[in-house]
Image (cartoon, helix red, strand yellow):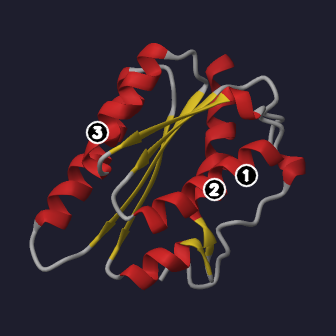
Amino acid sequence: MATATKNLSVYDKTTIPNAKNLRFGIVVSEWNPKITEGLFEGAHRALVDCGALPSHINRLDVPGSFELTFGCKRLIEKKDLDAVIAIGSVIKGETKHFDFVCSATAQGIMDLNVATDVPVIFCVLTDNTMQQALDRSGGKHGNKGTEAAIAAIKMAVLKDL
């Protein structure tokens, strides 16, 4: 397991660009809110910790992970953003629905990265159990939302290259 020995919330601010002048969007799935709210809190906290102004962080809620792509697209179209974070949680059930949602969501986020000049960070947990999701959204493995925020900052500064 890749995260078994890694805390997703650890970062070194000296290696991260200051986010003071950057604008971010965070699109949050309402499905599995215990997980997605934890991921949002980790992302928001890390952005602010790295200098982002709270007023420069735009949040948009969507019903589920499948809808993240459209939500990200709308934020990119309507707001002047430097990066967007797509936050969701899909937990494997008894049917193939998990596979379809995970695949379509990943493909949609990748398509946005190719089609626009605004990086979209994939912060969608695709876990086998609720415990795995809890462990990665503020639990024993830290917070994948924090990791996504750091990636968003690093990718946002690439726009100026």
Does any portion of residue 103 appear in the rendered image?
Answer: yes
User: Label 3, label 2: how many angstroms apart (C-alpha)?
Assistant: 24 Å
Kindly report the distance in space between the C-alpha atoms of the residues bearing marks 1 and 3. 26 Å
Q: Residue at x 52, y 59 (%)?
A: 37
What secondary structure is found at the residue carrying circle 3?
helix
Position of the C terminus, as image quadrant, is top right
- Kindly indicate the quadrant of the structure image that contains residue 9: bottom right
Q: Position of 129 compared to 93: left or right? A: right
Amino acid beneath label 3 = Gly
Q: Which mark is residue 115?
A: none
Q: Which amino acid does the dot numbered 1 rest on?
A: Arg
Q: What residue type is labelled 2?
A: Glu
Which label lies toward us, 1 or 3?
1
Query: Looking at the image, is 52 positioned above or below residue 142?
Result: above
Q: How many marks?
A: 3
- Residue topped by disc 2: 41
Whole-angstrom CA distance, mark 2 to mark 1, is 6 Å
Other-residue count near label 1 (Cα within 10 Å), few / some / many at <14 / 14–19 / ≥20: some
Secondary element at image label 1 = helix
Secondary structure beneath dot 2 equals helix
Residue 14 position, x and y percent, is: 90, 49
Residue at 64% x, 68% y is 8
Q: Which mark is residue 45?
A: 1
Query: Which residue, given by chain and number where applicable, does mark 3 sit on?
Result: 108
**Residue at horizontal 69 percent and vertical 27 percent from the top:** 56
Within 10 Å of disc 3 (Cα), the crowding (few <14, some 14-19, many 20+) is: some
* 89 over 109 or under it: above or below: below
Residue 24: percent from left, percent from top: 61, 31
Asked if marks 2 and 1 touch (Cβ < 8 Å), the reply is yes
